[in-house]
Amino acid sequence: MFPRPIQKSSTTAQWLYAVALPVALILWLFPLLGVALTSLRPASDLAQGNYFGMPSGIAWENYIFIFTQTPIGQYMVNSLWVTIPTVVGAVGLSLMTGFALAVYGFRANILVFFMFVAGNFVPFQILMVPVRDMTLQLGMYDTWYGLALFHIAFQTGFCTLFMRNFIKALPFELIEAARVEGVAEWRIFWFIVLPLMRPAIAALSVLVFTFIWNDFFWATVLTQGVDSQPITAGLSSLNGQWIAQWHLVSAGSILAALPPVVMFFLMQKHFIAGLTLGAVK
Amino acid sequence: MAQASQPVARRWTQRSLAPWLFLAPGLFMFTVYVIWPIIQSVTLSFFDWNGLYNKDGQFTGTFVGMGNYAELMRDPAFETSLWNNLKWLVLYMLALPIGLFIAIFLNQTVTGIRVYKSLFFFPFVISQVVVGLIFAWFYAPNFGLFYLLTESVFGKGTAILADPDLVTYGIIVAGLWPQIAYVMILYLTGLNNVAPDQIEAARLDGAKGWRMLWYVILPQLRPATFIAVIVTVIGALRSFDLVSIMTNGGPFGSSRVLSYYMFEMALGEYGFRMGYGAAIAVVLFAIMMIFISGFIWKMWRDEKER
């Protein structure tokens, strides 16, 4: 193990390490902690310039305010309407593309695969004008499905890379044996490969959920109003209205950050497996 | 399916058709929303177009050849954006050593270390919009922590987001925060897989500290480093959210990057200059293509080795 386990060092070093860990963490998360505290600080404190001292009370009313006086609840619901179909769609499509690219040795295989991989890395701006134009033409501008359809297509690139590598690592003899038995290809996919894909499906679901929940660019390009804007774009426009009302901005930020954070804590192992692209095993 | 009078032939056709049936839906979506728009954007970059159609539904753009690109060469805002992109690219690379340092710091087996690791990873999980707002608060003039800090050190506070010379660095620091967390997790996973016998052998030979890190550990972390470089480059060139949230490209356009400037030209208050925007996007795409090709080339080599 590198570095040397701290247990093998002197007691002083062990003590130092035990102190350094929480100190480092607090420093690292300092901006976030500050915002979390500000979100519970009464507006009157901020008005009096009490930004970092003892708060005069815990102001849950900041959260009540943004829920009752602003459409933040609606924005969160809109985010779910975009995020959940995207997770289902992208994972579903990539299970099939990943299967096709991992199991069959047809000629264009590697070409198609690299196309998915390369497409996944292109800058969004090269897609912006045509995608927005097409969405407008199809009458899907400013709707949750217009946004979700784009996300499904784009995320399929990344998901295909992951699924294909995952299926490649499965024992191929399983498929061979089934073929000898005369099992149809779609049944091999459905009854043999799919049940083994659970970890991959879990990993991609949490990752795609987080990516889409946090997406800001496409939310800005493809939606406009309160009825369809996701939380990121909504928070940005609320921020424009709440000039310098930092207790509200903070409360909104914490709310927007919450779902992916909860998701991450629940599914940590899968999340990290997905992020490392399976390349660092 | 037809009767199985010729089972061998039937299965052969089924097997050559099956991959395309499995690919069809995903490939269709990807072509419509990714591949085709790239081609369209490149085409559009040779036109002058305000994004509208006439009442018969016909495209109203006019062909200008290399006009948009010629204009880019003379556009000071484009030059600023390009320079800022370069700053992003270079400074973002700091995420690698810092991420590695934190990973090494956290790679211990004391009680509660798992919770520490996940809390250190936090910044990557939250939206860049939120990161931008958090740092805007951190940098805020008069009461922001950073302002107070500079005030107590230099006697005069620095409002970093209002300073044309410093603003880009301020935003890059905000971007580095989640990026370091990502790199850290890549290295933590990598460190987990370093061969213990090699470390022991090196230790017996008297290697420790920096020499151990440089000659024994880093070579074994190569796959992690490779992915870290790729995601960091992509992250640096994709920087849009933070610029948009923290400064809107200001003050006086000094924090623009290509991705943001493109958006401003095509959809912003400067009018709908779709063709000009597309030309900016093509330049960004070309820069990104250098790195994408490198990645694909490496993948191709790995595939052949299998």
Image: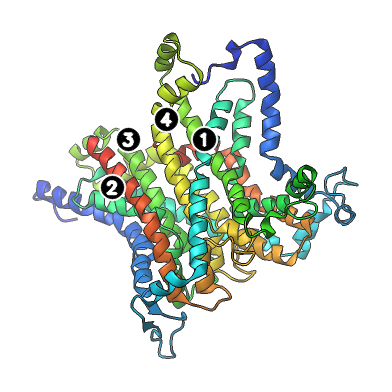
Disc 3 residue crowd, few under 14, some 14–19, many 20+, Cα 10 Å: few
Residue name at image x 55 percent, y 71 percent? A142
In contact (CB < 8 Å): disc 2 and disc 4: no
Alpha carbon separation for disc pair 4 and 1: 13 Å
For the question of whether residue A187 can be seen, the reply is: no
Task: For mark 2, name the chain.
Answer: A
- Compared across the picture, whether A241 is left or right of B43 comes to right
Q: Position of residue B214 (x, y in %)?
A: 44, 25
Query: Mark 4 = which residue?
Result: B221
Alpha carbon separation for disc pair 2 and 4: 28 Å
Q: Nearer the viewer, residue B17 or A263?
A: A263
Q: Amino acid at mark 1?
A: Pro
Q: Amino acid at mark 2?
A: Leu
Query: Mark 2 = which residue?
Result: A101
In contact (CB < 8 Å): disc 2 and disc 3: no
- Compared across the picture, whether A76 is left or right of A208 comes to right
Q: Nearer the viewer, residue B130 or A58?
A: B130
For the question of whether residue B28 can be seen, the reply is: yes
Residue name at image x 58 percent, y 50 percent? B172
Q: Amino acid at mark 4?
A: Leu
Task: For mark 3, name the chain.
Answer: A
- Could you tell me which secondary element the residue under label 3 belongs to? loop
Residue name at image x 56 percent, y 16 percent? A5
- Could you tell me which secondary element the residue under label 4 belongs to? loop
Q: Of callouts 4 and 1, which one flags the residue occurring earlier in the amino acid sequence?
A: 1
- Determine the residue located farthest toward the top in the rendered image: B204
Q: Amino acid at mark 3?
A: Ala
Query: Mark 3 = which residue?
Result: A169
Foreground tag (2 vs 4):
4
